[in-house]
């Protein structure tokens, strides 16, 4: 696990980056969740912004772990919001969903303060982070996962700005949660995340991105290895097909022979280039 001393992050990146660490974006009972902001000092006016969601099967991982993966975006002038959320050991499903929905609302409502361009906010995540990035970017308000959530004692989530993200980058994320919870692809991490809650199967279906595909969604880039043993590759294929069915602009990059992350240098370069081309297509870089 890679951990970083935020006092040294300026030196770790380069002196052209401003770092705003551990900003509290939500308090739930006695738990506070945080996000970090990295912003180029040269930014004048509104700036393209990447919202990053870490993975870890909803039960592990930290926002600090993915900092090295974000450096290429920083060097290209992106502002970055790196989001933490409650893991399964703190709160069972759907707590992480509620938190990330809240974080996205927070980003849009604080756009003027941090010079985020509301028209160029892209959400990216890997594995469970890919699930959260996709789901929380497309959830209809009617689902109620953010109903009554408070950011502070005097501000409810529904009082904040409505949001429409510009694009979604899904790196081998879970698109059908029920499949990895009780289906033929059942995984221990998913079972742990749900605990012993009543109607967990129904909840798993409710927080599956594939059930919310409809016309008018933002462009989606999916990247997935066809030998992934933790998140079935078939989920990426089915999501791609359903997005096509509803004519949602989308692309699926299949990494032949690749598993769950740990890509070769050649695969990593292909991923990076594909993301750049995708962003260029929609005039986001």
Image (cartoon, rainbow, N blue to C red):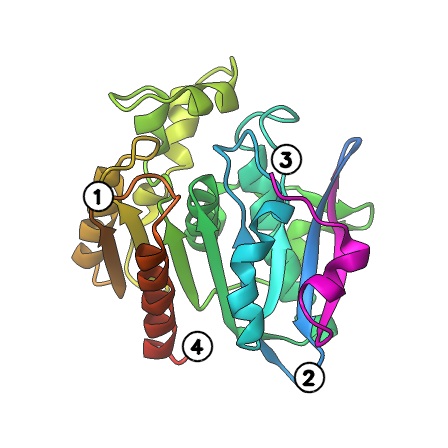
Q: Secondary structure at mark 1?
A: loop
From the viewer's perspective, is residue 249 above or below residue 263?
below
Q: Earlier in the sequence, mark 2 or mark 3?
A: 2
Residue under circle 1?
A: 257
Report the residue marked by disc 4.
Answer: 284
Q: Is residue 10 left or right of residue 229?
A: right
Which marked residue is nearer to the observer: mark 1 or mark 4? 1
Q: Earlier in the sequence, mark 1 or mark 4?
A: 1
Give the residue at x 82% y 57%.
7
State the quadrant of the N terminus: top right
Nearest the viewer among 63 and 241 is 63
Labels 1 and 4 touching (C-beta < 8 A) = no
Q: Earlier in the sequence, mark 2 or mark 4?
A: 2
* Residue 203, picture quadrant: top left
Q: Which residue is mark 3?
A: 86
**The magenta segment:** 1-27
């Amino acid at each position: 696990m890679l951990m970083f001393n935020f006092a040294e992050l300026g030196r770790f990146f380069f002196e052209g980056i401003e770092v705003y660490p551990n900003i509290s974006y939500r308090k739930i009972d006695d738990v506070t969740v945080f996000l970090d902001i990295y912003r180029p000092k040269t930014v004048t006016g509104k700036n393209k912004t990447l919202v990053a969601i870490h993975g870890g099967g909803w039960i592990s991982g930290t926002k600090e772990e993915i900092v090295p993966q974000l450096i290429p975006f920083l060097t290209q002038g992106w502002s970055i919001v790196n989001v933490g959320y409650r893991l399964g050991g703190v709160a069972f499903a759907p707590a992480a969903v509620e938190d990330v929905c809240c974080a996205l609302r927070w980003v849009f409502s604080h756009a003027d303060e941090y010079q985020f361009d509301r028209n160029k906010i892209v959400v990216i995540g890997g594995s469970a982070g890919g699930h959260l990035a996709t789901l929380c970017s497309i959830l209809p308000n009617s689902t109620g996962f953010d109903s009554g959530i408070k950011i502070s004692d005097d501000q409810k989530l529904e009082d904040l700005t409505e949001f429409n993200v510009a694009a979604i980058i899904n790196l081998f994320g879970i698109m059908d949660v029920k499949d990895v919870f009780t289906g033929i692809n059942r995984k221990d991490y998913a079972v742990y995340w749900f605990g012993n809650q009543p109607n967990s199967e129904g909840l798993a279906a409710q927080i599956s991105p594939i059930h919310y595909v409809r016309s008018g969604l933002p462009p989606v880039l999916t990247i997935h290895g066809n030998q992934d043993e933790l998140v079935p590759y078939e989920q990426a294929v089915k999501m791609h097909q359903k997005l096509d069915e509803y004519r949602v602009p989308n692309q699926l990059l299949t990494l032949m022979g690749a598993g769950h992350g740990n890509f070769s240098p050649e695969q990593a370069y292909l991923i990076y280039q594909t993301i750049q081309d995708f962003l260029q297509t929609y005039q986001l870089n």
